[in-house]
Amino acid sequence: TKKPKLDMPYLDFEDGDNSMQRYLHDAGSILERGYEQYLKEGLPFAMFNYMDASTPMAVIPLKYLEEVRSASTCKLSFNSFLNKSTVAKDIGGPLVTDRVIRVVRQDLNRALNEMIEPIQQACDKVFGILLPPSRDWTPLNGHSLLWPLVSRIMARTFVGPELWDSEEWHAVVSSYFHAGLAASQRVRDGYHPWLRWTAKYFDKDIKAIYAVRRKGEELLKPVIDARIADARNQANGQGPGFNDGVRWLVDAYRAENKPIKAEQIMQDEAFLVGASVHGITVNALSILFDLMDRPESLAEIQAEISQVHAEYGGWTRKSLGALRVMDSFMKESQRLHTPQHCTMQRRALEGYTFKDGLYIPAGTSIFLPSRLLGRDPDVHPDGAKFDAKRWKRMREEGDATKFHFASLQNDMLPWGSGPHACPGRFLVQEVIKIIFIHLVTKYDVKYSEGVESRPPDYLEHTNSIPNIMALLLFKER
Ligand code: HEM
């Protein structure tokens, strides 16, 4: 018997230009049309999937959220979606595993309190180097400031004290990330799925990935040995001496009785870098642009920082939690400018039928709307307006435990939802707050000559990335 096909309307560009380039830079306009025409009516639609040309994307409405959330990972899989769309296996990139997810969800979140101080030290050092004391305005784009800063913060968290500030390590991380992006795009666009395994023999970026992996393994080996020794010492009643990603990974492999290999730990670290550095960088930059456009909010946030600091005497998770104006501003910025148009992506590992009969064939990936949901005025009152204190008011007038930057909500999905919701979101919340405490208390920031407000986002398939290359001017206050 013939297998059922994806049964939903298919949207493409109505003017007939359906080139890959068009999907790379303009897919958002199809999503906008589909959101208004179908999703808001509770109906799904399909469109070309730039990340996997073999099957269309199935974009489904919010009414399926609960079912997607609770579907078994053997049927609707986030890991499979990610591994397939990054073509990680064919380019030698890192695969997401349940183990590495567990490390973030359990070990990282347990350690968050202890991370606050090292994150502040990383900020002190990197700001000091990139924006040294000067009476003049220093030009720097958002990427040049935030990438090295966030990369060091994440290295302190996931690698530990030995390599967090190592130029060699950061060169490995940066080369791996950039070669990975280039290779995955070229292999997706240029190789038939059956022939992708051959790309490693020809593609210069894949060769670069294997080379930086080896370099990274060399750097990690002494760190891994120190963590194995630390775990042994702890078993004998001493320590622990380390609380970082390499130690958590070593513990995870030991608990499973699996060999501890530098090769695998390097790949786990690469996944953690990929999941965190770019996302935090663009989220922080987006908030910075929104803040520069609202001097009255900036002044309120500066006043809140000094009042909370005076009250608590320093920065801990508790005092960071008391920055309610800042938290609300961050969340409002994320509501309007979350980079991902869609989240809750899952790949159907077998044919999947929703309760109302909607059928998703094996191999098809589903997506839920995130950015357009956040902007929808029927979902968020006065949805087009940047209302800086929207979420602070909701906490005061409604439930004080909800509506934080890292809270999960059904009416906006920047972190996804349910058991697979982003486990790194609490770290993101604290990191962005610490970065802004440094930035707005120590520096004035303005746009370069001729730019009045937030520059337009870059559109990249179903993502809208804040303009990381726009030049900003910084001066010590
Ligand atoms: C602003 C930055 C970030 C954003 C916007 C973001 C967003 C997301 C989203 C939308 C998901 C999918 C959730 C779902 O489908 O239900 C996810 C998953 C995940 N994120 Fe993040 N994330 C960010 C930063 C981080 C960081 C810093 C880490 C690591 C520390 C991290 C680790 C993960 C992991 C491990 C998963 C997979 C969870 C699972 O499948 O159970 N993310 N993230």
Image: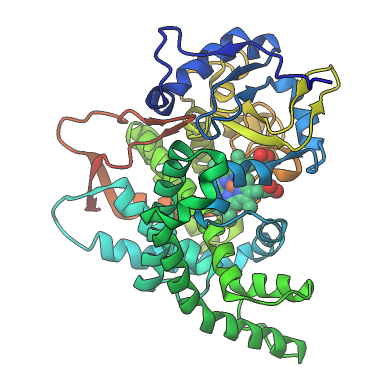
> 35 or 73: which is nearer to us?
73
Please tell me which residue is depicted at 59% across the width and 85% down the height of the picture: 225
Query: Where is 104 relative to 11, above or below?
Result: below
**x, y percent for residue 467:** 33, 37
Q: Is residue 317 visible?
A: yes
Is residue 277 toward the left or the right of residue 72 in the image?
Answer: left
Please tell me which residue is depicted at 78% across the width and 71% down the height of the picture: 256
Is residue 57 toward the left or the right of residue 294 in the image?
Answer: right
Query: Where is 448 relative to 28, above or below?
Result: below
Query: Where is 183 relative to 58, above or below?
Result: below
Among the 4 quarters of the image, the one containing residue 368: top right
- The quadrant of the image that shows the N terminus is top right
Query: Where is 308 relative to 168, above or below?
Result: above
> 236 or 177: which is nearer to us?
177
**x, y percent for residue 186:** 41, 42
Q: Is residue 161 visible?
A: no
> 372 or 94: which is nearer to us?
94
Among the 4 quarters of the image, the one containing residue 175: bottom left
> 476 or 464: which is nearer to us?
464
**x, y percent for residue 320:** 55, 54
**x, y percent for residue 36:** 57, 10
Please tell me which residue is depicted at 49% across the width and 46% down the height of the picture: 279
